[in-house]
Image (cartoon, rainbow, N blue to C red):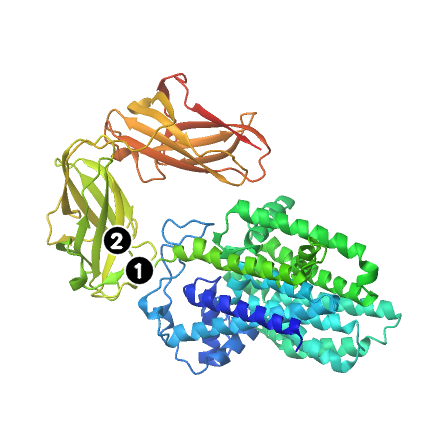
Amino acid sequence: MNKEGKLLWVLIALFLLIGGWYSVAIPLGEGVDEVPHFDYVRYVKENHALPIQPWQDNGRPLLVSMGHHPPLYYVLNALVIAGINTDDFSTTFIPNPHFEWGGNYHNDGCNVYLHPPVQDWPWRNSVLAMHLVRFTTLLLGAITLYATYQIGTQLFPNTPWIPLTSIAWLAFNPSFVFMASTVHHDTLMAAVFTLGLWWLSTLSKTNLSPQRGVIGGLLLGAAMLTKLSGFSLVAVYGLTFAYFAFRNRSLKTILPCAGSTFLIAFMVAGWWYLRNWYLYDDLLGWGMFRNIHAHMLRQGSFTWDTFTHEFLYQLGQTFWGAYGYMHIVFPEDRWLNLWKGAAILCLIAVGVIWHKRKSWFTGKQLEIWGILGNGLLWLFLSFVSFAMSTSGAGHARYLFGGVTIFVLLLAVGSHALTCFKYQPIITLVITIGLAAYSILLPVKYILPLYPSTNTFIVSQLPNETTITNIHFGQDLTLVGYKIGTPNKYGQTDLELYWQTDSEHSPDLYVNLYLRQADNTLILQYNFWPIPSFSTVGWEPHTIYISQRTLQIPPGTPPSELQLGLTITEGRNGIALTPKNAKLINATEAVVAVLQLQSTVVFAEEIKYPRADVFEANIELLGYNISPPPYRAGQALDLTLYWRSKSPIQQQLVVFVHVLNSEGQLVAQHDSAPNQGRAPTTLWQPGTIVTDLHPIVLTENLPSGIYTLSIGIYDWPSIQKLKISGGPFKDKDALIISTIELP
């Protein structure tokens, strides 16, 4: 083995090391559709059969949501875990009922699934099985890298550092590592597709014999038996064979190889599509898919605007680093900068390749470039076609099988920056930089979103704990609490110690109230006890902790405050009856009494004071706004500061409008004050209310000056409140600021 070959295995080993760390560090079930894909594997393992999906009147229940996919990935992994007991699947992988899909929306927990202690080391049963499938998938990622390198050596036989650098660009792409370290058939698709391109690239330098067609047919059949996008490889094969026939001016020279290739492919994968036809009345099973996954179907037409602002945007956003269900993404300005850098490198590479075309390439190598470009194009088109019928198809993970041409261009551009001098150093720098990037990205942005759940037993409660043992219904006990002394700004930390009394608790919700001695409500918090770990997954006789920072409203005078709790089943469900506690009403138990020694001081600086008065005696004291620059597609934070002169009976909503130079609405944010956490019915006269509005500026807003306008309306009548004092008197909205977009 030469030096470059050894370095290839070093790079692959480093990829396996980082991918192995991903596989262990990222909680089980947090890969894209990971649990449903694993459920398919488990079904095949336990039933020794493929699932039959519900269709028309066949009477079949939906047992495997991913059962519409071709089965190769699932059968292979069913063999891997054949000897492992997975009967605990349903109790090990419990969906997080609080999860809401949305890009970087983590208010109620980022995790898609709960992560009970059974998932910790030592691994057993379903946990062990999923880790084994993850490791098998990681090996498939390594195969993709190996095939990519082999293609590169055919294009650059005398410049081995270029193929090695291309491997670094792919191996340490965080999105590629993530997909390869979780359970998903996209990684098998990437491996088989890249192997297929490698096989095609070897044909340009060898005889087109029927024997060679056997290997190509196996790869093509494997692609078609992995995912419907495998049909894009059929197009690549067909066009390549057609080109060879044109080049040789003879159809006879390619027929034996092409015939054996497509025959073997049909023998490998044809039965699956015939099965679809028999069971679901069409070869692809598309009608069955649309019936089961109707929620994925596109509503409305697929326009050019949809293609650019949804499909291409998603693709660009998820290529350089996306995690979870693609709901955890890298900050936009950073991945855009990576794309800008990549575009520059690719342009440099194209220029260099054109300049060196005579010395670098023979006709055979130009054919390989054509094969690679053809592969990426058809794979891309297959997902454009998918996106025309469904939403959310613009994920870069779909294209990893065809990015060989892209990473090779990045490698050429990287070395061209130094005129192809210091090639080992350039490869080393890129490897270290990208490897560090693939490690630091999850460390900074991902893993903190999956906090471990702190638990202990009663004997381990902190010494400062006040024991309460308040029972709520038959399901929950507040064992005790710990609360600090409020500082002059009214802030204090609260810990609530819970214990479930049932093995099957419902999803419980906490309503916390802070009242004055006369029961006047001055503060309310509504929250899940642990947003990332619902009570449905709690184990009996284990203490769980809720941690909150209370903010007593500024202006609250010295007084004795009562802390009360109501527990409901879900956000709006039935309240559980408290026992063994002083009651404020039938469902609210007094938990603690808090002594406020001095009037609460307002902690924030209001940079832009105002003196506007709305109906209902509501004063706008001022606002703060996040500093420029402001960019389309990004959010700016506007914080308003309100004070009421009297109690408010209405449920009021604050609106913030962004208007262009013609007064047209281009962006907005409407919500009850402070995103619903400070409803106006809870405002106390004289206290200052902080009201944050994160306003997302619409994509592709042109540069220019925009106006921020705010107002208040009643809910649900939508009747706007008039301004009764200030420069905008008698109007129903006021202008508070302007912003400039570059």
- Assess disc 2: are there few (<14), some (14-19) or many (≥20) residues with their C-alpha within 10 Å of its C-alpha: some
Which image quadrant is residue 705 in?
top right
Q: Residue 479: percent from the left, percent from the top?
A: 16, 57
Q: Residue at x 23, y 30 (%)?
A: 555
According to the picture, the residue beneath numbered tag 1 turns out to be 453
Depicted 726 relative to depicted 738: above or below: above
Horizontal and vertical percent position of residue 384: 64, 55
Q: Is residue 225 visible?
A: no
- Kind of residue sitting beneath label 1: Thr
Q: Residue at x 52, y 35 (%)?
A: 630
Q: Is residue 80 above or below residue 91?
A: below
Q: Tell me the element at label 2.
A: strand
Q: Residues within 10 Å of mark 1 (few under 14, many from 20)?
A: some
State the separation of the CA atoms marked 2 and 1. 10 Å
Q: Which mark is residue 546?
A: 2
Quadrant where the C terminus lies? top right
Q: Which amino acid type is marked by label 2? A: Ser
Q: Residue at x 81, y 76 (%)?
A: 255
Q: Is residue 522 left or right of residue 360?
A: left
Q: Earlier in the sequence, mark 2 or mark 1?
A: 1
* Vertical placement of residue 581 versus 687, above or below: below
Q: Give the percent coordinates (x, y) of residue 65.
A: 48, 66
Horizontal and vertical percent position of residue 222: 63, 74
Does 287 sit above or below residue 663?
A: below
- Number of callouts in the render? 2
Q: Quadrant of residue 612?
A: top left
